Amino acid sequence: SGTGSRVLWGLISDRLFYGRRKPVLFLVGALAALITLFVALVSSATPFWVIWVLIALWGSTVMGWNGIYLALVSELAGVHVAGLAIGLSSTFAFLGIVVVPPVFGFLVDAGFSYRLAWIALAGVLFVPLIFLRWVRER
């Protein structure tokens, strides 16, 4: 769902938002955080199909944002420094791939629960939405 949603989010950005990337990134980020909170509520009593739908939706947000993000960064930077801007921003954006999993695991071990870790992850997903406020699209 993450791979397919990259195309879907691009279509949504181009067709429904007339090429504007910021509102789509905000939508994807908000949905990712919200779905993560729902994942935190999953228990052994949750039907399998509900878990499947949640994880498919979660993947389409937490993995699907990348194309819109890279388009926005390159558009904001301009033609002459787009590659540099994408490289630098991706370096910082993808630090989460290295940092978040061990922190998630630590929270699970320390709290003896996945719920705390999922709630913390939802909080982390909300943070970029705050900074997105100051982005000015052309």
Image (spheres, rainbow, N blue to C red):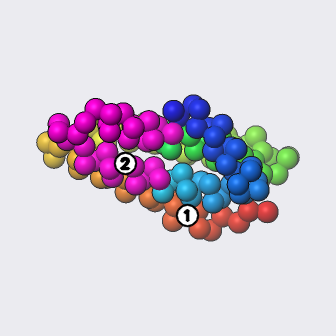
For the question of whether residue 86 can be seen, the reply is yes
Residue lying furthest bottom:
134
**87 relative to 64 in the view: left or right:** right
Q: Quadrant of residue 52?
A: top left
Tag of residue 37: none
Amino acid type, label 1: Phe
Quadrant for the C terminus in the image: bottom right
Q: Nearer the viewer, residue 130 or 99?
A: 130
Q: Work out how far the residue at label 2 is from the one at label 1, CA to CA, in angstroms.
A: 20 Å
Residue at image location 42% in from the left, 53% down from the top: 33
Judged by depth in the image, the label closer to the viewer, 2 or 1, is 2
Question: Mark 1 highlights which residue?
Answer: 131
Task: Give percent across and percent down for residue 45.
Answer: 17, 39
First reached walking from the N terminus: tag 2 or tag 1: 2
Residue at image location 28% in from the left, 32% down from the top: 48
**125 relative to 134 in the view: left or right:** left
25 versus 112 height, above or below = below
Label 1 secondary element: helix
Q: Quadrant of residue 102?
A: top left
Amino acid type, label 2: Thr
Question: Mark 2 highlights which residue?
Answer: 36
**120 relative to 127 in the view: left or right:** left
Task: Give percent across and percent down for residue 15.
Answer: 74, 50
